[in-house]
């Protein structure tokens, strides 16, 4: 099992934002080779597209997605493995222009792991300054403290069933705000019970929205719905609307 290392708490946000991958163990950094040749000031982008937001409390709304390349994790259920390596270099200004051209007021930065690229931080700030509502979907393995506080963070907490639970940066949960959401993707009952422990330990249901979704093809959403009702906690069931609309294997939707 590989492990993420938390970044030191110096309070130097500029420095943290410019070197997010340096807080990772060497074996994880090897997975980020696609980013090695990316010039400073640019982003390695897998795809930019319009779709219906499939998850979070924004589910159902039109949204522009900016999917960045590369991830330090390898979750067993990952449905965006094509974003580990494939992408094209874009100038930050060109990404902003493309998001503006597509036009929706809601934008999500996703991946891969979007926080690995230093330029993702000023990109989010630029989009916020343009009046966009910016969602950040992050795998939870990178320190979020340098993210613009206006961003609505959707923070994954990786369960044992993902195979990447040792990569969680737990201090991210200390920073979670009412406008953020925490998400658990669950493989089985063991994952659900584990998630309940994390939710209780960090008092999450009183602090932010808590999303739970079932690994496609491994856990039936109806079973998860029954567990939610039994728990009597205000957990929000995620049905991954985009997969219901366009199929589990569709890309760019
Ligand atoms: S963090 Fe997300 S993109 Fe990375 S491996 Fe896990 S599911 Fe895939």
Image (spheres, grey):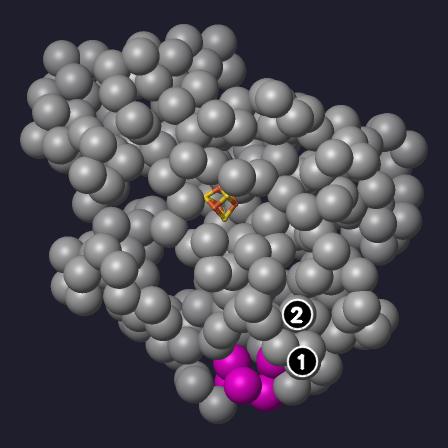
Residue pictured at 20% horizontal, 45% vertical: 239
Residue pictured at 68% horizontal, 78% vertical: 89
Task: Give the quarter of the image for residue 59.
Answer: bottom left
Report x, y in % for residue 44. 66, 70
| Mark toward the start of the polypeptide (2 vs 1) | 2
Residue 96 in magenta stretch: yes
Q: What stretch is highlighted in magenta?
A: 95-100
Q: Is residue 153 left or right of residue 34?
A: left
Residue nearest the observer in this picture, 197 or 215: 215
Report whether residue 114 is seen: no
Task: Respond yes or no on whether mark 2 lies under 8 Å from ligand 1.
Answer: no
Give the main secondary structure, helix, strand or loop, of the magenta stretch.
helix
- The local secondary structure at tag 1 comes to strand
Q: Do the residues labelled 2 and 1 touch (CB within 8 Å)?
A: yes
Residue nearest the observer in this picture, 227 or 23: 23
Residue pictured at 47% horizontal, 60% vertical: 82
Task: Respond yes or no on whether mark 1 lies under 8 Å from ligand 1.
Answer: no
Report whether residue 29 is seen: yes
Report x, y in % for residue 207. 46, 27
Residue nearest the observer in this picture, 75 or 7: 75
Q: In this view, does 42 lie to the left or right of 85?
A: right
Residue 99 in the image: above or below residue 85:
below
- The local secondary structure at tag 2 comes to strand
Q: Which mark is residue 44?
A: 2
Residue 120 in the image: above or below residue 89:
above
Quadrant, the C terminus = bottom left
Residue that mark 1 sits on? 90
Report x, y in % for residue 60. 23, 61
Residue 148 in the image: above or below residue 238:
below
Residue 19 in the image: above or below residue 231:
below
């Amino acid at each position: 099992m590989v492990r993420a290392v938390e970044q030191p708490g110096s309070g130097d946000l500029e420095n943290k934002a410019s070197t997010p991958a340096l807080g990772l163990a060497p074996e994880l950094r090897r997975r980020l080779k696609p980013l090695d040749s990316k010039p400073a000031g640019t982003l390695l982008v897998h795809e930019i597209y319009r779709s219906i937001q499939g998850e979070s409390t924004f589910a159902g709304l039109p949204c522009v997605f900016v999917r960045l390349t590369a991830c330090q994790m390898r979750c067993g259920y990952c449905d965006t493995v094509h974003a580990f390596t494939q992408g094209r270099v874009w100038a930050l200004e060109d990404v902003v222009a493309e998001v503006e051209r597509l036009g929706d007021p809601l934008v999500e930065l996703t991946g891969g792991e979007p926080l690995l690229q230093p330029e993702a931080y000023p990109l989010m700030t630029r989009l916020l300054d343009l009046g966009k509502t910016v969602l950040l979907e992050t795998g939870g393995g990178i320190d979020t403290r340098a993210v613009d506080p206006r961003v609505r963070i959707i923070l994954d907490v990786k369960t044992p069933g993902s195979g990447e639970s040792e990569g969680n940066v737990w201090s991210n949960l200390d920073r979670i705000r009412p406008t953020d959401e925490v998400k658990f993707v669950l493989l089985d009952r063991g994952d659900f019970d584990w998630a309940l422990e994390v939710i209780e330990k960090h008092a999450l249901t009183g602090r932010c929205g808590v999303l739970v979704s079932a690994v496609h093809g491994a856990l039936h959403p109806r079973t998860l719905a029954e567990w939610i009702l039994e728990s009597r906690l205000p957990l929000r069931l995620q049905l991954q609307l985009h997969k219901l609309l366009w199929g589990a294997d569709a890309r760019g939707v």
